[in-house]
Image (tube, rainbow, N blue to C red):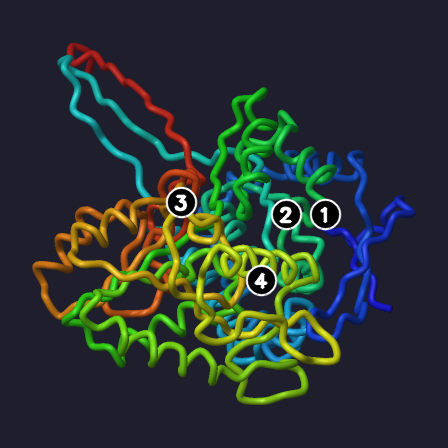
Amino acid sequence: MKRCQPYIDGQFVVSKTTEMIPVTNPATGEIISEIPECTIEETRQAIEAAESAQASWAKLPAIERAGYLHKIAQKIRENFHHLVRVISEEQGKIISLAEAEVNFTADYMDYMAEWARRYEGEIIPSDRPNEHILLFKVPIGVIGGVLPWNFPFLLIARKMAPALVTGNTIVIKPSEETPNNAFEFAKLAAEAGLPAGVFNVVYGRGGVVGKELASNPKIGMISFTGSVDTGSKIMAAAAKNITKVSLELGGKAPAIVMDDADIELAVRSIKASRVINSGQACNCAERIYVHEKIAEQFIAEISVAMSSTKYGDPLIETDLEMGPLINEQGLAKVESLVASAVAAGAKVETGGKRASRDKGYFYEPTVLTNLSHDMEIMHKEIFGPVLLIMTFKDLDEAIALANDSEYGLTSSIYTQNLDIAMRACKEIKFGETYVNRENFEAIQGFHAGMRKSGIGGADGKHGLEEYLQTHIVYIQYDMSKK
């Protein structure tokens, strides 16, 4: 059986722990590998290795640091098919989406590397004669990265690439559900000649390894993607050292479909935004608000579209749109939320139950109507292929319903009226709004939310600057001296 090894200070090491965590293929339920439950001491070793390497790494010109990222990107492309299989096997991702994730990851490495000559400080005018004020952008130090399981390979790059190009070093903890891709990434980093200690990988559960990364005083910033509950715990652990946190904590994305919308486009885009990764994406459209004039047609068409979704085992079946959920716990959560809504009066238009398959964690693509906004399912993140549909009378009501959430990550609106689109973009209180398209962000954008969707963000110039801090210098000089 495959056993993943921690990568610490440029070496794959044998963990001293006897506690092993099995890794399962969610499409079959079969154990495919195991990882060590790294100890606090091993986690500290990784942090210390990163700290020791950081000063010399930061002294390299940014363009030289970027060169290593380009080399890793090339290694990713050279190992494309192998990486696609690894990701699909441990996460249940369909092959086309795994391919997109691998390509996107390589592109992300290259994109962030290209910021080496672009991120800048400032020269600020002084109130005094004969003085210059210089603002430098400098690295934070050692970054702790705690990853989710839904886009595990991309999230390594999303945290590691901007950290490294700006002169930081990093310790990554992948999800215990999907560690194999991180093991493969570490191999590629080693092959690319990345200096020892700059990039480190430790395995384990959040209560031990994640807690140490968040609470260790040598960590300058902890970057986490995952649930609100875990994000709150990380924030609390980081608080004692006043450690900076960057948190992406999920969403409950609303989609507004106006009466002038292109219904075919809305159905296609909303379905794509819901079944991507089996509904296990924080930017998935979950709450659909449809104008009452077109509700009957929209519900009929989206129900047909969802019911026709082809799902199965990505490593065996072809032309799939969806794979399994990550594990039994995730499947049971979706099942429970739907059952509770139905008991409270919701109507199942299609789906509504576990898929009748011999093995794996599959849930039927589902559409629910006859919902009220006080139902639990309208406010709790589902993380499964379930669409919730309510109707509205006018834009005021739709915006009010959309904003009625503790989350604030992604949102969307479908309309052919520019005035309506612009008003919605102004009044919808979410970090991202998509107009007449599916919910999926761009490398050069800024993926960030409001309220309980998190603090800080990723991607683009603003995501890069998450990994920088300022050092301001006042230089006074004497003009009388020659």
How far is the residue under mark 1 from the one under mark 3? Answer: 30 Å
Residue bearing mark 3: 407
Sequence-first tag of 4 and 1: 4
Give yes or no for contact between labels 2 and 3 (Cβ–Cβ under 8 Å): no
Residue bearing mark 4: 153
Sequence-first tag of 3 and 4: 4
**Vertically, is 316 above or below 86?**
below
Sequence-first tag of 4 and 2: 4
How far is the residue under mark 4 from the one under mark 1? Answer: 15 Å
**Vertically, is 282 above or below 241?**
below
Residue bearing mark 1: 202
- Name the foreground residue: 342 vs 100: 342
- Crowdedness near tag 2: few (<14), some (14–19) or many (≥20) residues, C-alpha within 10 Å: many
Identity of the amino acid at label 3?
Answer: Tyr
Residue bearing mark 2: 172
How far is the residue under mark 4 from the one under mark 2? Answer: 12 Å
Give yes or no for contact between labels 2 and 1 (Cβ–Cβ under 8 Å): yes
Q: Nearer the viewer, mark 3 or mark 4?
A: 3
Identity of the amino acid at label 4?
Answer: Phe
Query: Circle 4 — which element?
Result: helix
Identity of the amino acid at label 2?
Answer: Ile
Image-based side of 298 in relation to 447, left or right: left
**Vertically, is 14 above or below 311?**
above
Whether residue 362 appears in this view of the structure is: yes
